[in-house]
Image (cartoon, rainbow, N blue to C red):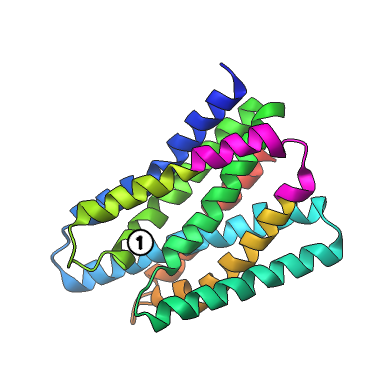
Amino acid sequence: MQPHVFAVLLAGFAGLAMPLGGLLAWCEQIRNPVLRDRVLHTIAAFGGGALASAVALVLVPEAAAALPAGWAVGLFAAGGGVFYLIDALLERRGGSGALLLAMLLDYLPEAMALGAMLVADAATAKLLALMIFLQNLPEGFAAFREVWSGSSPAWHVLLAFLGLAALGPACALAGVLWLADAHAALGAIMMFAAGGILYLLFQDIAPKAHSSGSSAPALGAVAGFALGLAGHLLLG
C-alpha cells in the first residue's frame, strides 16, 4: 500500500474515536446522580491525564529535539498565549470548548507526526495510531458532554466531531508529503500545540474535572497519564 494512502487510513482510524466517544456520551444513561457525576468527572480527568502525557512525553521532547532552545521556548509560550486569547473570547461569548480545543491540539500534530513517521517506520506508526485512538476516545466522550447543551440535536454535534476527525487524515497526508524531512517545521507545530494544551489543562480541564468528596477523578488522571506513558515506552 502506498504510504500516503496508509497514512490517511491510520489517521482516519485514530480520528474516529472522537465521534465514537461522543456517541458513547450521548448514549450514557447513569441514573444515580452521585455515581453519574463521579463517572463523568473521572472520564474528563482521564482525558486530561492523557493530554498531559502527550505534552510531557511526545510533543515537547520531539519538538525540543528538532528546534533551537530559544525557538522552542518562544513557541511554547506563544501557544499558551494564543489559546489564552481564544479561551477568553469563547468565555466572553458564553461558549465552552476547552476539551475540544485541547483534543484537536493533541490529535492534529500527532497525525502529522504519524504521517512523517510512516515513511521511515510503518510498525511504529501503526502503534502510534492505536495510542491516538485510545486517547481520543475518552477525550471525545468528555468533549461531547462539554459542547452539547441539549438545545440542539445531538447528531449535529456528532457530525461536527466526524468532520473534525477528518482533519486528521489531511494532517497525516501533509506529514507524508511535506514534513517527513522538515523536522523543524513539524517541531514548531508540536511545540506551539503543547503550550496551548498546557494552558487549557490548567485553566479549564483540570478544575472542571474535580468532583467533591471523590478521589476517582484524580485516579482517572493518573490512569490517563499511565496510558500515554505505556504508549511512549512501547514506541520508544
Residue 142 showing in the rendered view: yes
Picture coordinates of residue 53 (x, y %)?
59, 58
Placement of the N terminus among the 4 image quadrants: top right
| Quadrant showing the C terminus | top right
227 with respect to 23 (left or right): right
Examine the rendered structure and indicate whether residue 63 appears above or below residue 17.
below
Q: Which of the two residues, 54 or 161, is positioned nearer the viewer here? A: 161
Bounds of the magenta segment: 168-186
- Count of residue discs: 1
Judging from the image, what secondary structure is the residue with disc 1 in?
helix
Is 169 covered by the magenta stretch?
yes
Q: Is residue 97 magenta?
A: no
Q: Nearer the viewer, residue 40 or 220?
A: 40
Where residue 114 sits, quadrant-wise, is top right
Image quadrant where residue 174 sits: top right
Q: Residue at x 50, y 62 (%)?
A: 102
Q: Relative to residue 94, is residue 70 drawn left or right?
A: right
- Which residue has dot 1 on it? 142
Q: Main secondary structure of the magenta part?
A: helix
Q: Identify the residue shown where x is 37% and y is 65%.
A: 42
Amino acid identity at mark 1: Ala
Residue situated furthest top in the rendering: 1
- Most foreground residue, 136 or 155: 155
Rendering quarter of residue 43: bottom left
Image location (x, y in percent) of residue 82: 60, 72
Residue in the image at 72% along x and 35% along y: 180
Mark 1, Cα crowd under 10 Å, few <14 / some 14-19 / many 20+, is many
Q: Residue at x 59, y 18 (%)?
A: 2
The image shows residue 196, relative to residue 93, as above or below, that is above
